[in-house]
Image (cartoon, rainbow, N blue to C red):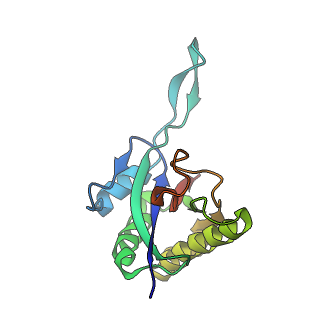
Amino acid sequence: MYMLAFGTLLLALAAPALAQDHGRAPTVEQMVQSLTPQPKTRGFSAGRQEGGTRNLIPVLDLTVNFDFDSARLREDSKALLQDLAAALLDPRLSEYRFRVEGHTDAKGTAAYNDQLSERRAQAVVSYLSSTGVATERLEPIGKGFRELLNPADPTAPLNRRVRVLTLR
């Protein structure tokens, strides 16, 4: 019997955050808008009035389910990843590449979690590729538990996630 482990797919990209609302996934259009990098803006740095340019990075949180202690995608995550693929295939995002980072909670050893997070990132990339997203646009990487989303609770399900970042 498989136990369910939850991962959160964080799409850290370019403007205000769009979070999944109580189990309702964002639409493909909302994903496209969240993943589209915004132009560089002027910003203040370290309290000085002269500003430099910086990129704003919006975050989109999606829940992706894997089998417990596994990189096997659960069936209930495939519709969400299908929508993500549709967003990545949208012409407005066609010029961008994306880094897919796997993250785990702090249960287990660092070496084991590094491998698990890499396999989970690769599972998402493989699924997206099977839907038509070009593999060369996707870069999987395992982060293990080095960048906990909830450091106050290192074993929280929220820490088990995949983060996708827009690359230029």
The picture places residue 112, in percent across and down from the top left corner, at 69, 70
Q: Is residue 95 among what the camera can see?
A: no
Taking the view exactly as shown, the residue that stands out farthest to the bottom is: 1
Q: Residue at x 42, y 68 (%)?
A: 64
Q: Residue at x 65, y 64 (%)?
A: 141
Lateral position of residue 120 relative to residue 37, left or right: right
Q: Which quadrant of the view contains residue 22?
A: bottom left
The picture places residue 148, in percent across and down from the top left corner, at 57, 51
Counting every numbered tag in the picture gives: 0
Taking the view exactly as shown, the residue that stands out farthest to the right is: 111
Lateral position of residue 35 relative to residue 108, left or right: left
Q: Is residue 17 among what the camera can see?
A: yes
Q: Residue at x 50, y 76 (%)?
A: 68
Residue 144 vs 45, above or below: the answer is below
The picture places residue 11, in percent across and down from the top left corner, at 47, 55
Residue 164 vs 111, above or below: the answer is above
Q: Residue at x 64, y 61 (%)?
A: 144
Tell me the quadrant of the picture where the N terminus can be found. Answer: bottom left
Taking the view exactly as shown, the residue that stands out farthest to the top is: 49
Lateral position of residue 110 relative to residue 100, left or right: right
Nearer the observer, 142 or 138: 142
Residue 30 vs 78, above or below: the answer is above
The picture places residue 62, in percent across and down from the top left corner, at 39, 60
Nearer the observer, 87 or 77: 77
Residue 110 vs 17, above or below: the answer is below
Nearer the observer, 134 or 27: 27
